[in-house]
Amino acid sequence: MSTHSKIPSGLGARRDKTYQEDEHDSYKLQGKLKEPTACPTCGAVFHQGRWTWDAKPAGAHETQCPACHRIHDKYPKGLVTIKGPFKDTQHEQLTGVVRNMEEKEKTEHP
């Protein structure tokens, strides 16, 4: 008599999927911050697991947010490259579009 258990058809481990490592971001917090926590540089507040633009509560802990940490280190999350003949003639318009997008994103994501 065999003591090995048999796995019913269809319930075995799948071996056809590849493992993908999560994106590595050295600026991502490694643990949870004490709440509330405020960034002394930009004033963003860490509350309920995310950074927001709420008012700084009295007695809040202080630590630099990941965005300010990147700015301080001069290590941006991404770069925008503009190429083509229009980049010189339409420089002001392109700069305006980028600034408008920056303001929109900043209102939602510190």
Image (cartoon, rainbow, N blue to C red):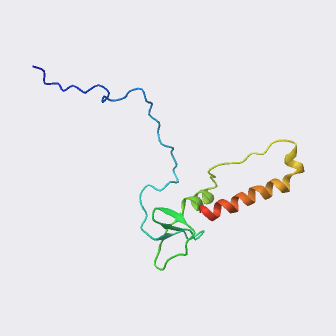
The residue positioned farthest toward the right in the image shown: 89
- Residue most extreme to the front: 9
Count of labels in the image: 0
Residue at x 69%, y 48% (from the top left corner): 79
Q: Is residue 93 left or right of residue 51?
A: right
Side of 15 where 88 appears, left or right? right
Q: Position of residue 67 (x, y in %)?
A: 58, 59
Residue displayed at 87% across by 51% down: 90
View extreme (top): residue: 1
Question: What residue is shown at x 42% (from left), y 26% (from top)?
Answer: 16
What percent of the width, then of the height, locates residue 20?
47, 36
Task: Note whether 42 is above or below 89 in the view shown.
Answer: below
Q: The N terminus is located in which quarter?
A: top left
- Residue sitting at the far left: 1
Q: Nearer the viewer, residue 84 or 107?
A: 107
- In the rendered view, tell whether residue 57 sits above or below residue 39: below
The image shows residue 72 at horizontal and vertical percentages of 61, 60
Residue found 74% across the figure and 45% down from its top = 81
